[in-house]
Amino acid sequence: MEELLKDLKAAGVHSIKSDSEIILEIFQDELRSPNKVDYLINRLLTLDKSRIEKVKIECPQGILDKLVVTRGKMKVIGERLIFKKQFAECENKKVPPYEVWPLLNKSSITFLSEVMNFTYEQTEKFLKSMKTELPEQADKMFTVYTVHSEPAGVVFPHLEPGRDREGRMFWIGIHPDFKGKGYGKNLHLIGLHRLQHDFKAETYLGVTRADNAAMRKVMEANGCLQESNSVFSLEYSFSG
């Protein structure tokens, strides 16, 4: 599997691998060899004895049309928009208060489970998967936005492996008790601030569903520019 992912990277396909799934990203409009990429993805989907439960891919319509075998095997599950931001050297906006919490202690897991509406066990699994995927960064990613000293939301900023100082947010969410108050912009701004100043990112890339108007407004309000082309999300499950 690792050799396949290396071959895909050489062909222009970025991969993100966790314990249970692989995400393939093709955000550019052109591929040097779409037939080779189609072949490699097909091989990935036919691996035997794989621990991976799902393979997902995100790519523009123009690329998807050239991946004939891949498109025939995978299910389109949505359309997403890409937003980007270049960090200016002098950029230093006033940032709302926040704290960095330990990743896997009980209070962190309990709070995140309330934000995500997951069970304690599901939340713990999510965090352990994140630590597996980003072992050198995970322990400093759990960033909590506080309002009047109360935890109001969580964001997980990080540098994307294999990219040149590209910052992303692994997950972002407001606690149910604080929703509907316009706090999403502040939480996202905290994530951007940490990416630039703590993780030393030079750029930010954010992706959100095309129908998520609230998140689109948040990113636009924080100076992120929408790319002209959207990407389609596809999924293949090994369980059928």
Image (cartoon, rainbow, N blue to C red):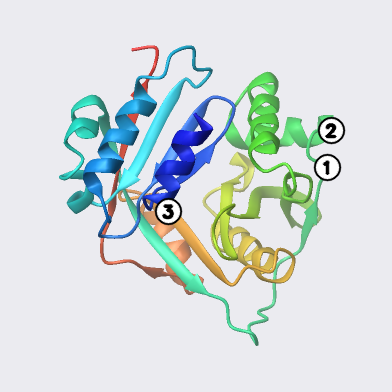
Label 1 residue SS: loop
Three-letter amino acid code at the position of disc 2: Asn
The dot on residue 102 is 1
Q: Does label 1 or label 3 sit earlier along the sequence?
A: 1
Position of 97 relative to 176 (above/below): below
User: Which residue ends up furthest to the bottom in the rendered image?
Assistant: 90
Q: Residues within 10 Å of mark 3 (few under 14, many from 20)?
A: some
Query: Mark 2 Cα within 10 Å, few/some/many (few <14, many 20+)?
Result: few
* Snapshot quadrant of residue 93: bottom right
The amino acid at mark 1 is Pro
Q: Is residue 163 left or right of residue 120?
A: left
Q: Is 224 rendered above or below residue 183?
A: below
Q: Which residue: 22% across, 42% down?
A: 35
In the image, residue 140 above or below residue 3: below
The relative height of residue 42 versus residue 97 in the rendered view (above or below) is above
Gap between marks 1 and 3 measured at Cα = 26 Å
At 48% from the left and 42% from the top, the residue drawn is: 6
Instruction: Give the residue type that dot 3 points to.
Output: Val
Distance of label 1 from label 2 (alpha carbons): 6 Å
Residue at horizontal 60%, vertical 26%?
Answer: 118
Q: Disc 3 or 2, which lies upstream in sequence?
A: 2
Residue 105's disc number: 2
Q: Position of residue 162 (x, y in %)?
A: 56, 54
What is the quadrant of residue 68 in the picture?
top left
Could you tell whether 73 is left or right of 119 in the image? Answer: left
In the displayed structure image, the side of residue 95 where residue 139 appears, left or right = right
Coordinates of residue 37 in the picture (x, y in percent): 30, 42
For label 3, the residue is 207
Q: Which of the two residues, 219 or 51, is positioned nearer the viewer here?
A: 51
Q: Secondary structure at mark 2?
A: loop
Say which of 125 and 40 sits in front.
40
